[in-house]
Image: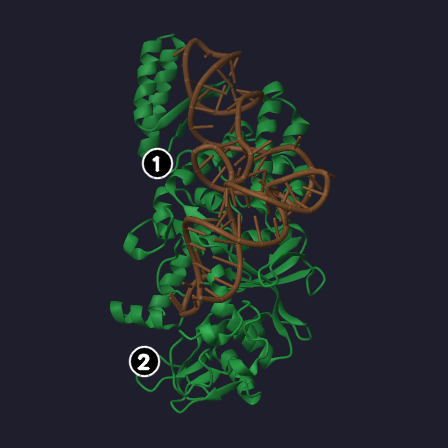
RNA sequence: GGCGGCAUAGCCAAGCGGUAAGGCAUGAGCCUGCAAAGCUUUGAUCCCCGGUUCGAAUCCGGGUGCCGCCUCCA
């Protein structure tokens, strides 16, 4: 496995801290609204990484947090007149639902910030003890960035001179110093701590939760891989790394992975543009699996420009896989190790080269169709083929559904009944060679968005995009 | 202003020094009552200029054009 490390800016051979085991921590969402396509992309990328690592035989411990306390959650709660807990629960649930819809498996562990306050306090205390943090008069606790010689080395920034846009607090020792703990003096949401009532700083959450839930004693790094969106490199990950190295005797992550951004029709996602922003909206129009296939189709480090035209092209590519599955429908056989699976892992093992993996899938489909055209009854061949297809499902996470249902997205039972009825009538007309009637029926079906295909096994239909 | 990324056929997109994967769309053929599906086939010298090299889309220098981060953010 090779991984591009976004700190060293080079592709590295992956060597886990502990033989056969991988610890992966990914920054999860702040649950104050529904998940958008960017959340989906990030979740998909690391879901794929997990699948590949597991397929390579690693025992993967994957943690992805939920930030369930934050100013934005508080604001949303005020806006809707309900508690922050309700907000967090509502959007955690919708996050889980949306991610499941695109085939993102749940992480091994999903720590919540509000359930980890003690871990955060413990870390703050360490930082205070080691003089890497200080308290100002109002009770806020800040990280002293000047006390960490390695500060800014993660994101490769020269000095903190240009990092001056964070809030100006006159008592801060350095402009770049960030809050570890914010004291709360009014009635707003707060947690009790040895430092008084307050709320934790966002950057602290991940460091503390990694330390508490993921890290094994004695390792040089807290985790093997730390991931997240490209925007998190600075300041979030820079700050996390600083906290971890200053509070303990180890660095945070051996490998850093950052996924690219999702734009929509070339524009940065924004609510004001009113474009298909939320994943749940995209899921109304397209099958979750189609969205998975599409969002995963380009390299994870590249920016991804989401648009419907490309999505449809992508769906057509996935359709080919399902048409092949239709040809094999009803067959089952024990899964055997295939060369194809090896090739797939080889491609994905190269810093998740999905394009190469997809090309392999395409080539598999073409050669399979060709072979089945020549010799439809070749049993050993079909067994290998079915095994290859299950490798696609296992590693890439698509292609596992009933192939007929894939082509019936968005239809209810009465729609299907009506279509089946028309198809049956057309078959009757064809039987008596009344082609005028059968063509008229096909036109009717076409008008319904249904495409007809006559095969040796009978007539099949698909809903078209 | 500082830091970083990208530029490959109509579109999406691999490629990491040896003479351009794959998909969508398009044209043609086979198959079909006709279609659809499937199969075969059709097309780029890689933003521009210069350099290194026997050889560069791939390395170096200089342009041009997009984009991201530097503020909460996947």
- What's the colour scheme? by chain
Q: In the image, residue A444 lies at what x, y percent? A: 30, 22
Which quadrant holds the C terminus of chain A?
A: top left
| Chain holding disc 2 | A
Q: Which mark is residue A443?
A: none
Numbered disc 1: secondary structure? loop
Residue at x-position 46% and y-position 86%: A173
**Does residue A373 lie above or below B62 as drawn?**
above
Q: Toward the viewer: A169 or A191?
A: A169
Q: In the image, residue A204 lies at what x, y percent? A: 49, 75
Q: Classify mark 2: residues with Cα within 10 Å, few (<14), some (14-19) or many (20+).
A: few
**Does residue A361 lie above or below A142 as drawn?**
above
Disc 2 designates what residue? Answer: A188
Disc 1 designates what residue? Answer: A411
**Does residue A150 lie above or below A24 as drawn?**
below
| Chain holding disc 1 | A
């Amino acid at each position: 496995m090779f991984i591009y490390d976004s700190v060293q800016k080079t592709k590295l051979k992956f060597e886990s801290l502990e033989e056969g085991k991988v610890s992966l921590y990914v920054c999860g969402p702040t649950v104050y609204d529904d998940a958008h396509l960017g959340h989906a992309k990030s979740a998909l990328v690391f879901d794929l990484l997990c699948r590949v690592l597991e397929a390579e035989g690693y025992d993967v411990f994957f943690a992805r947090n939920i930030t369930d306390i934050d100013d934005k959650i508080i604001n949303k709660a005020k806006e809707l007149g309900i508690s922050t807990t309700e907000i967090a629960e509502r959007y955690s649930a919708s996050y889980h639902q949306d991610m499941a819809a695109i085939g993102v498996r749940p992480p091994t562990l999903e720590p919540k910030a509000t359930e980890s306050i003690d871990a955060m306090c413990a870390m703050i205390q360490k930082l205070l003890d080691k003089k890497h943090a200080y308290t100002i008069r109002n009770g806020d606790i800040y990280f002293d960035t000047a006390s960490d010689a390695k500060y800014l080395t993660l994101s490769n920034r020269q000095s903190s001179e240009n990092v001056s846009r964070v809030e100006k607090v006159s008592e801060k020792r350095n402009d770049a110093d960030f809050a570890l703990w914010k004291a709360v003096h009014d009635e707003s949401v707060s947690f009790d701590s040895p430092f008084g009532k307050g709320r934790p700083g966002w950057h602290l959450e991940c460091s503390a939760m990694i330390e508490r839930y993921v890290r094994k004693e004695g390792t040089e790094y807290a985790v093997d891989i730390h991931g997240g969106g490209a925007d998190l490199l600075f300041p979030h990950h820079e700050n996390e790394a600083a906290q971890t190295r200053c509070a303990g005797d180890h660095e945070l992550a051996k490998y850093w992975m950052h996924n690219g951004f999702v734009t929509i029709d070339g524009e940065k996602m924004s609510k004001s543009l009113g474009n298909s922003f939320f994943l749940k909206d995209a899921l109304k129009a397209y099958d979750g699996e189609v969205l998975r296939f599409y969002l995963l189709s380009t390299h994870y480090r590249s920016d991804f420009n989401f648009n419907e035209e490309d999505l449809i092209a992508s769906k057509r590519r996935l359709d080919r896989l399902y048409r092949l599955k239709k040809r094999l429908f009803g067959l089952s056989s024990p899964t055997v190790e295939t060369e194809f699976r090896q090739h797939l892992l080889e491609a994905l093992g190269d810093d998740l080269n999905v394009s190469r993996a997809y090309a392999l899938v395409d080539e598999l489909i073409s050669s399979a169709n060709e072979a089945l055209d020549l010799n439809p009854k070749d049993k050993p061949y079909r067994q290998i083929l079915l095994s290859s297809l299950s490798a696609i499902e296992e590693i890439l996470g698509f292609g596992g559904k009933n192939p007929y249902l894939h082509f019936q997205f968005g239809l209810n039972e009465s729609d299907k009944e009506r279509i089946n009825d028309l198809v049956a009538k057309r078959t009757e007309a064809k039987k008596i060679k009344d082609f005028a009637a059968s063509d008229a029926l096909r036109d009717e079906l076409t008008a319904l968005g249904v495409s007809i295909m006559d095969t040796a096994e009978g007539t099949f239909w698909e809903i078209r995009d």
